[in-house]
Amino acid sequence: MPLNLVSWNVNGIRSCFSKGFEDAVLSLKPQIICLQETKATPEQIELPGLAKFHAYWNCAEKKGYSGTAIFAKEKPLAETYGIGVPEHDREGRVISLEFADFYLVNVYTPNSQRELLRLPYRQAWDAAFLAHVTGLETKKPVVFCGDLNVAHKEIDLKNPASNRRNAGFTDEERAGFDQILAAGYVDTFREFEQGPEHYSWWTYRMNARARNVGWRIDYFLASERLRPQLKAAKIHPEIMGSDHCPVSLTLK
């Protein structure tokens, strides 16, 4: 039976819930749902449509900020929160679940911010996060997903020339993504689709989504040894409710 995984930066789970979150995400028939930028604690919201899923939340120390969650139909063998580095584990950005055949890691990568104020921190984060997943890789294959806050190639955003040196399209951030691929991970969407104008995030300004002026910054990456198990990887721009849309991965 295929395994359907969905990842979505909901930009506030409470706001997204009011815009039809549950029906939208369940329409993709997922066995596992990974959310980023939840901006809430589990006590602040009820999700009746996901009652049959096992729920795992990692909330930021700062209220209403960042945060991740995973909902899984199958109970994992183990779960861990963060990457074991106190400097990086205050914002609720990583959840790792161990299943029989692989690890699943949900990540919300820090944004480098305007004027790249947080770019040095972001570079340190990228190295620490990659060390986390490659550590898991020594035990079994890894799938990781989420908002990685980088458009890897010029094809991955509408206006690459005017966005050079902007957060999410700096040489340093793109090199960080190169390091992920060099470590043996596959950008699953590009296994199935090589063409342009496939985006997962659009600014709320200037009617950008209707004009498809966007960025592809939400990903599923998988261990090279899982490549034969890849069945489909998709972006779902038709699903509204956030400034991001869901992305999905189906494993055989």
Image (tube, rainbow, N blue to C red):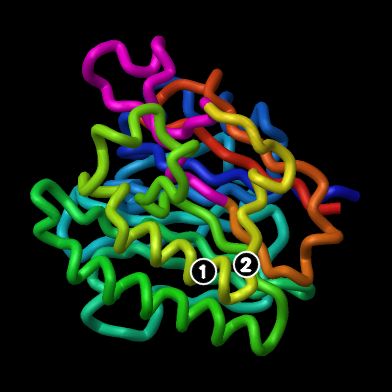
Q: Residue 145, position in %: x, y? A: 54, 56
Secondary structure beneath label 2: strand
What is the number of the mark on residue 229?
A: none
Q: Specify the segment rendered in magenta.
A: 197-219
What is the number of the mark on residue 185?
A: 2
Say which residue label 1 marks.
180
Q: Residue 119, position in %: x, y? A: 19, 63
Residue 242 visible? The answer is no
For the point 72% across and 47% down, which residue is it?
191
Q: Is residue 218 magenta?
A: yes
**Front residue of 19 and 122:** 122
163 left or right of 128 in image:
left
Residue at the farthest right position: 1
Q: Quadrant of residue 158?
A: top left
User: Which tag, 1 or 2, sits closer to the chain's start?
Assistant: 1
For the point 78% across and 61% down, which residue is it?
227
38 left or right of 181 in image:
left
What is the spatial separation of the Cα atoms under label 1 and label 2, in whole angstroms? 6 Å
For the point 43% across and 18% down, which residue is it?
212
Q: Is residue 193 magenta?
A: no
Q: Residue 93, position in %: x, y? A: 35, 63
Labels 1 & 2 near each other (Cβ < 8 A) = yes
For the point 75% across and 46% down, which residue is it?
250
In the displayed structure, 24 sits above or below 207; it is below
Dot 1, how many residues are within 10 Å of its Cα: few (below 14), some (14-19), or many (20+)? many
In the displayed structure, 232 sits above or below 89; it is above
